[in-house]
Amino acid sequence: MRIDVVTIFPGYFDALELSLMGKARDRGLIDLHVHDLRDSAHDKHRTVDDTPTGGGAGMVMKPEPWGAALDGILVGAGAGSDAASEAGEQPLAEPAAEPLIIFPSPAGEVFTQAMARELAHEQHLVFGCGRYEGIDQRVFEEYAERGRVRLVSIGDYVLNGGEVASIAMVEAIGRLLPGVVGNPDSLVEESHEAGLLEYPSYTKPAEWRGRRVPDVLLSGNHAAIDAWRHEQSVERTRRVRPDLLGD
Ligand SMILES: Nc1cc(-c2ccc3ccn(Cc4ccc(CN5CCCC5)cc4)c3c2)n[nH]1
C-alpha cells in the first residue's frame, strides 16, 4: 500500500518510522511519502492560511497550496502517460488504482475497526492534514468531483489538526495488512473485531499480590476457555459499550 501524507508538520510522522510501522515500511508493505504543504505554497512567505471569509476566529487553510500539493500526488499516482501508452500500445504496468483522499475532520464520519478493515484493501491512500480552523471547503469539493474523498473523525473531541488522527488511522489500517503483524490470529480475537470488546488477559505468575488468574484459564480445557472469554467479552461490552450490542 502506498500512503501519501500532506501536512505543515512533517515531523509528526517520524513516529511512523518506529516499531511495527517501521518494519512494515522496511519490508515494503507500506510505502509512506510525507509532503510539507509549505513546499506547495509558492508565494514569497509560503503562506498556507488566511482569515475566514465572513468573519470568525482563527485562520483557514488556503485552497491554492492544497490544490498544488494534491495535484502533484494524484498526477503521479495516475502514472501519467508512459511511452508505451503514448505510442498507443497497451500500457505495460497495471493502471494505478485511484487513490482515496482522507481528510481528518471533527465533522467527518467516525473511524471504526470496520472502516480500518475496509481501507486496508486500498492500494493508495492520501491523508490531507488540516490545521488552524480547517481547510477551505472548495478543496473537498474539487477533489470529491475528481476522485474519492472521505472526511473522517477519530472521535468526538477536537484536536489541533489532522496529524494525530492520520497517524492513528495509518496504524489501525497498517496493522491489518498481511505480513505486518507477526501472528495474524491476534487480529481476529481483538477488540471490536467481532463487534465486541476484548476479554481480560492474564499471564504468569498465576498469583500476584494475592490475585489469582481465573481457574478456567489454567484448566487446559480450551472449549471452556473460549466460552469463558466470549462471555467476558459480551459482559464487558454490555457494561461499557451497550451501543455496540444494538440493544
Ligand atoms: N476527530 C478529530 C479530528 C480533528 C481535527 C482534524 C483536522 C483539523 C484541522 C484543524 N483542526 C482543528 C479545529 C479547530 C476548531 C474547529 C472548529 N471550528 C469552528 C468553526 C470552524 C472550525 C475545527 C477544527 C482539526 C481537527 N479533531 N478531532
Image (spheres, rainbow, N blue to C red):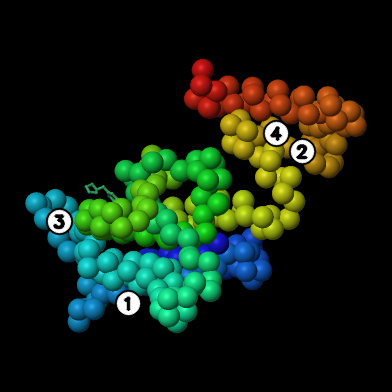
What residue did someone put label 3 on? 52
- Pointer 2 with pointer 3, Cβ within 8 A: no
Q: Secondary structure at mark 2?
A: loop
- Indicate left or right for 224 with 132 as reference: right
- The mark nearer the N terminus, 2 or 1, is 1
Q: Percent from the top left, x then y, of residue 234?
A: 64, 24
Q: In front of the other: label 2 or label 3?
A: 3
In the displayed structure image, the side of residue 146 where residue 29 appears, left or right:
right
Q: Is residue 154 above or below residue 97?
A: above
Q: Which residue is mark 4?
A: 200
Q: Quadrant of residue 51?
A: bottom left
The residue under label 1 is 39
Give percent across and percent down for residue 223: 84, 26
Whether label 3 lies within 8 Å of ligand 1 gets the answer yes
What residue is shown with label 2? 202
Q: CA distance from mark 4 to mark 1?
A: 48 Å
Q: Nearer the viewer, mark 2 or mark 1?
A: 1
Q: Amino acid at mark 1?
A: Asp
